[in-house]
């Protein structure tokens, strides 16, 4: 018996005779174990169960926020379960609320919540970066031409050698070349984020 043959269903005898194959199949997806003297059992990784529990907890938080009494808007209510939203500009709260609900519904329709946790992690990493001083390119004053600046040691006491290692983009804040008709780095045109790279916060 190969793993493919028991990728979905295996008998209790299969589990006794070939436990390794059944377990490998369970690593790839749920395996139903049929029994003669009882109802079938489902074998699956514990991480899958933990993910489902976490998804249910997240869904309950969204429902509770949407039904909470009071005059606050739904995005404002999400500050309760997601207090780190406070580090983002207020216009981003509404964008987060819309996206997290949309993705949650889509994930529920296929019983797979991996995408939901990815989106949530992206937003949280953006908040963490903003709290740490990150400023989006759209909120910087870009120069059309390079401009000379004083050596950092004049104000900070750092040696001039350190200033020579500072990238020109940081020292001059020069506007980047237009690529494909859009200003900025091409990686920032994928809906504002790449992996867990902080999304570009909008101005207030």
Image (cartoon, helix red, strand yellow):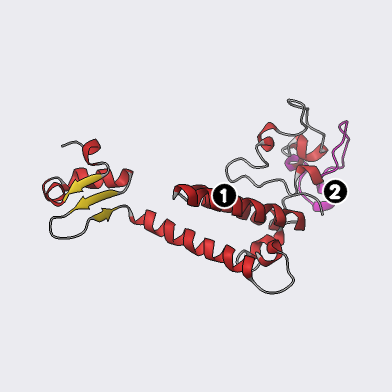
Q: Is residue 144 visible?
A: yes
Q: Residues within 10 Å of mark 1 (few under 14, many from 20)?
A: some
Instruction: Give whichever of 120, 130 is nearer the camera.
Output: 120
The local secondary structure at tag 1 comes to helix
The residue indicated by pointer 1 is 103
Up/down of 154 relative to 194, above or below:
below
With 88 as the anchor, is 99 left or right in this view? left
Up/down of 81 relative to 134, above or below:
below
* The image quarter in which residue 167 lies: top right
Instruction: Give whichever of 131, 138 is nearer the camera.
Output: 138
Instruction: Give whichever of 85, 111 is nearer the camera.
Output: 111
Dominant secondary structure, magenta: loop
Q: Position of residue 39 (x, y in %)?
A: 21, 59
The residue indicated by pointer 2 is 154
Membership of 9 in magenta stretch: no
Q: Residues within 10 Å of mark 2 (few under 14, many from 20)?
A: few
Say which quadrant the C terminus sits in.
bottom right
């Amino acid at each position: 018996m190969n793993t493919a043959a028991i990728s979905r269903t295996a008998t209790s005898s299969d589990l006794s005779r070939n436990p390794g194959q059944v377990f490998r199949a369970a690593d790839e997806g749920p395996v139903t174990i049929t029994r003669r003297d009882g109802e079938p059992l489902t074998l699956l990784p514990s991480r899958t169960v933990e993910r489902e529990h976490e998804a249910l907890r997240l869904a309950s938080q969204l429902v509770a926020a949407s039904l909470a009494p009071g005059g606050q808007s739904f995005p404002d209510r999400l500050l309760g379960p997601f207090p780190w939203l406070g580090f983002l500009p207020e216009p981003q709260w509404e964008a987060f609320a819309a996206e997290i609900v949309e993705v949650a519904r889509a994930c529920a329709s296929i019983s797979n919540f991996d995408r939901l946790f990815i989106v949530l992690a992206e937003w949280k990493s953006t908040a963490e970066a903003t709290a740490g001083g990150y400023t989006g390119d759209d909120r910087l004053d870009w120069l059309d031409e390079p401009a000379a600046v004083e050596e950092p040691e004049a104000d900070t006491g750092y040696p001039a050698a350190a200033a020579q290692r500072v990238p020109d983009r940081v020292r001059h804040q020069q506007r980047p070349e237009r690529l494909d008709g859009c200003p900025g780095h091409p990686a920032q045109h994928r809906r504002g984020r790449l992996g867990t790279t902080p999304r570009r916060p909008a101005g207030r």
